Image (tube, helix red, strand yellow):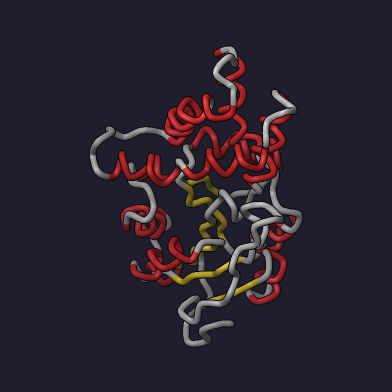
Amino acid sequence: MSTPSLSPPKVLAFDVFGTVVDWHSGIAREVQALRPAVDGDAFALAWRAGYQPAMRRVMSGELGWTLIDDLHRLILDSILPQFGLIDLTEAQKQHLNKAWHRLDPWPDVLAGLRRLKSRHVICTLSNGNIGLLTNMAKRAGLPWDCILSAEVFRAYKPDPAAYLGVARIFDAAPAEVMLVAAHQDDLAAARACGLQTAYIERPAEFGAARPKDISPHPANTRHATDFLALADQLGC
């Protein structure tokens, strides 16, 4: 799926959690390494479920500007009793909270990013904080040209400041930037700011037992099964 009237984008900005890395498997694995009896699937889903409500507390002004690392810790502390983990030591809690820094990319990601990087500037556009995204990239070998985050703009997606901020940093028109994401709401917010959009299918984002609807949305500029397919579409 493509919109041939648009020029190829100069900058590809990538959502990260779910699009680039498999958060569900990573979080489930990390908690089960600490406590094998814990239902890792349920724990990962519960932790992720707190993500949007926590960000809304920041966006509404209830909380001042707060990094995702700190929001993750607030959520973690709130769900530990539910999973019988209130006796974790502070060191164990800190280690578990940094699990988000240690997530693995989907199998197509490294090769796909290298191909896309050959013809485009590639950067993150994530609500994750810069330290988290840098640690993740270093561990996994993610070849970003630049790491951008809501932290740079002090605005969490879907605030327009995040999407338009990417264009401003690269001195590009919004239409010269393409958001690459596995989430239709993120892509819709980017389109409203004039960006091109590419939907990436990640049917197992919430675990193999909960396949996502990956139906194409006609408003997206591109729809691809993975990063390698997007590279094919963009001639990389």
Q: Is any atom of residue 145 visible in this view?
A: no
Relative vertical location of residue 6 with respect to residue 67 in this rendering, above or below? below
Q: Is residue 136 left or right of residue 168?
A: right
Q: Which residue is drawn at 55% across and 13% down?
A: 90
Residue 214 percent location from the top left of the image: 60, 70
Q: Which of 227 and 21 is in front in this view?
A: 21
Q: Where is the C terminus found, in terms of image quarters?
A: bottom right
Relative vertical location of residue 199 with respect to residue 75 in this rendering, above or below? below
Q: Quadrant of residue 39?
A: top right
Residue 205 percent location from the top left of the image: 63, 55
Q: In this view, does 215 lie to the left or right of 177?
A: right
Outermost residue toward the bottom in this view: 5
Q: Which residue is drawn at 72% across and 28% down?
A: 37
Q: Which of 9 and 47 is in front in this view?
A: 47
Q: Is residue 131 left or right of residue 170?
A: right
Q: Where is the N terminus found, in terms of image quarters?
A: bottom right
Residue 86 percent location from the top left of the image: 55, 18
Q: Residue at x 28, y 33 (%)?
A: 63
Relative vertical location of residue 23 with respect to residue 164 in this rendering, above or below? above
Q: Is any atom of residue 219 visible in this view?
A: yes
Q: Say how many tags the image has.
A: 0
Q: Residue at x 49, y 41 (%)?
A: 128
Q: Nearer the viewer, residue 119 or 231?
A: 231
Residue 134 percent location from the top left of the image: 57, 37
Outermost residue toward the left in this view: 61
